[in-house]
Amino acid sequence: MSSISLQGLHHVYANGHVGLSEVDLEVHDGEFLALLGPSGSGKTTLLRSIAGFVQPEGGTLCLGGSPVAGPGVWVPPEKRNLGMVFQDHAIWPHWSVARNVGYPLRLAGVPRKTAEARVRSVLGLVGLDGLGERAPSALSGGQRQRVALARAIVGAPQALLLDEALSSLDEPLRARLRLDLKTLTNEQGLTAVHVTHDRAEALALADRVAVLRAGRIEQIGTPQDLVRNPASAFVASFVNDAVLLDGTWAEGRLQIAEGSSIPGERLEAGPCLGADGLGRRELAVTAAVSPLDLVLHPVHPDHDGDTWDTGRERTGVVTSALYGPHGFDVSADWQGRTLRAHVTGWVPKPGDRVLPEVLRAQVFAAEVSGAVAGTAAAAGVIGGAAGNGAGNATGDAGADAAAGPDAAAVRRTLVTA
Ligand SMILES: Nc1ncnc2c1ncn2[C@@H]1O[C@H](COP(=O)(O)OP(=O)(O)OP(=O)(O)O)[C@@H](O)[C@H]1O
């Protein structure tokens, strides 16, 4: 059975802003669902509608199979049996930990002995064993958030609603609580809906992730689905940090810019292109390229064979290179667009010239201009089949530059059909 069910949920605020637009959603019993999306996409409105803090203008909302909002139905928040955790703990500073956690049980009139035993047990579940008599001021930020979590689950709610609940914590506290939250919800079979801006957190924690955009659910699926099979360029950009390249599909290649194209065998048609995939027609499309599928080949500083006949530069320039344990996260400016790539095998630094190459891209029908609100301003790329000057990823840029535009160098370093 669905623990939480929304049909055609709709809400427009008094100022005309669309909070939710005809949202259908089923959250299954024991499922952990993350709501992910850019600012203003409707995540909070959706969560607050479930909680009962927003009364939707249209549609129906059921909890545990019973309607709580809809035509002629309205169940107030305190009657919905939901646990909520906010970003800022919201615990009473002058009450002990145990008193804070036991508050919902006192409200519900649970006998004192039963309540004390339940509080002790829940404190154990959230890793606060033996800290019941502490004052909140004597706890760390992470511990205070565990108190809020304990209070949210102490009454055995039918669902747990988390509103940016981990966002105020610093790493590694946040990583630790993330792990504990996942274990706790799994072990206790809790249904949870978690609003977050943090895509890594959404992908790590959730059984399914709903990506919101302008009050609608753009895609819902497992983390693997969203990463491997994004339904749109927007999802690819938002979830996978993909660079978006507008271009034209024609004659077996995706033309990205003057002289720069991606051969068809490196392209995968997204679902919006239908069963025929890219087909034979000329199409305006957007290619989404994950930073892991974009190679930046270093170009030797002395090499000057990197312009088109028109004099336009084929290479890009590294604008930032952030070191990490598994390589560098690099941004490069290429023909006025920002490319992002994960670089291993050589040490990039700002100012380095690079030649980009796309290994794989997902292609979507082009959106009407400006429709991809909130995506990275990114993108454009890639390798032309002529010329050279690019070193390969093992750092032999100098050797290539010295070799001149020979066929071997071209094969080794550039996108070719
Ligand atoms: N109380 C309100 N009054 C008027 N408009 C609102 C109100 N709350 C939200 N909105 C508008 O509704 C839309 C959805 O906002 P919502 O807060 O649900 O998005 P969000 O994805 O949670 O954003 P954020 O990540 O910034 O919190 C936005 O256009 C927002 O400006």
Image (cartoon, rainbow, N blue to C red):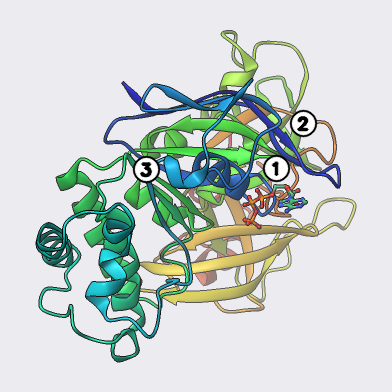
Residue 165 location, x and y as percent? 43, 62
Observer-nearest of 390 and 194: 194
Give the residue pinned by disc 2.
367
Q: CA gap, disc 3 to disc 1?
A: 47 Å
* Identity of the residue drawn at 78% across and 43% down: 13
For marks 1 and 2, give the one nearer the viewer.
2
Residue 186 location, x and y as percent? 20, 45
Give the residue pinned by disc 3.
81
Residue 256 location, x and y as percent? 74, 39
Mark 2 surroundings within 10 Å by alpha-carbon count, few (fewer than 14), some (14 through 19), many (20 or more): some
Dot 1 amino acid type? Leu
Q: How many numbered circles are shown? A: 3
Mark 1 surroundings within 10 Å by alpha-carbon count, few (fewer than 14), some (14 through 19), many (20 or more): many
Give the residue pinned by disc 1.
245
Label 3 beta carbon less than 8 Å to ligand 1: no
Is residue 72 depicted above or below 37 in this figure? above
* Identity of the residue drawn at 54% across and 43% down: 52
Q: Secondary structure at mark 1?
A: strand
* Identity of the residue drawn at 73% across and 67% down: 304
Q: CA gap, disc 1 to disc 2?
A: 12 Å
For marks 2 and 3, give the one nearer the viewer.
3
Left or right, 186 with respect to 305, comes to left
Dot 2 amino acid type? Glu
Residue 207 location, x and y as percent? 33, 38
Dot 3 amino acid type? Asn
